[in-house]
């Protein structure tokens, strides 16, 4: 059980550093692993202007498109990072936006079940 907690802790730390370097500073993150899926919840990741923009349908679509494009740009680098940590290949990455909670949730689909 100690090894399992340490693995998640190391994974969360690596993702936190990765996103802090490429985005805007450090944010509170939580990692959950379910079989071949890594779920990264980033709290307060949306700025107030993004939340305001999301009140309009066109704004929500624009934010989703920008974030999906960002995921595709990050995929090679985050794929290398996840492969180093998990030993698995990143198949896909997508993001969900939750304006009311100012959160982003990244879903990393891996090539096989992630052993913790």
Image (cartoon, rainbow, N blue to C red):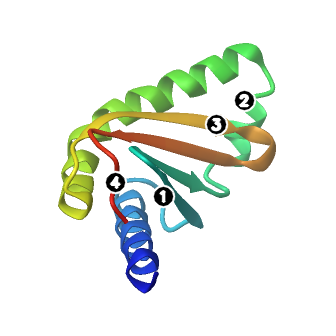
Which dot, 1 or 4, sits closer to the camera? 4
Question: Do the residues under discs 2 and 1 have CB atoms within 8 angstroms?
Answer: no
Task: Decide if residue 28 is on the left or right side of residue 54.
Answer: left
Locate residue 111: give its quadrant: top left
The image shows residue 11 at horizontal and vertical percentages of 37, 67
How many neighbours does mark 4 have within 10 angstroms: few (below 14), some (14-19), or many (20 or more)?
Answer: some
- Please, which residue is most extreme toward the bottom here? 2
What residue is disc 2 on?
53
The residues bearing labels 4 and 3 have C-alpha atoms spaced at a distance of: 25 Å
Q: Position of residue 20 (x, y in %)?
A: 42, 63
Badge nearest the viewer, 3 or 1: 3
Q: CA distance from mark 2 to mark 1?
A: 19 Å
State the residue at coordinates (48%, 41%): 107
Q: Nearer the viewer, mark 4 or mark 3?
A: 4
How far across and down, in percent of the image, does residue 84 sit?
A: 18, 61
Rounded to the nearest whole Å, what is the CA distance between mark 2 and mark 3? 12 Å
Q: Secondary structure at mark 1?
A: loop
The residue where tag 3 is placed is 97
The label shown at residue 114 is: 4
Q: Sequence-wise, which precedes: disc 3 or disc 1?
A: 1
Which of the 4 image quadrants contains residue 16? bottom left
Pick whichever of labels 1 and 4 is earlier in the sequence: 1
């Amino acid at each position: 059980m100690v090894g399992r907690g340490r693995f998640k802790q190391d994974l969360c730390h690596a993702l936190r550093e990765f996103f802090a370097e490429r985005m805007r500073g450090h944010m509170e993150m939580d990692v959950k692993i379910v079989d071949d899926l890594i779920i990264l919840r980033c709290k307060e990741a949306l700025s107030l202007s993004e939340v305001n923009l999301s009140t309009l349908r066109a704004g929500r679509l624009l934010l989703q498109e920008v974030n999906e494009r960002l995921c595709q740009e990050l995929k090679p680098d985050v794929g290398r990072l996840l492969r180093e940590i998990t030993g698995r290949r990143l198949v896909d990455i997508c993001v969900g936006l939750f304006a009311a909670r100012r959160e982003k949730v990244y879903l990393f689909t891996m090539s096989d079940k992630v052993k913790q």
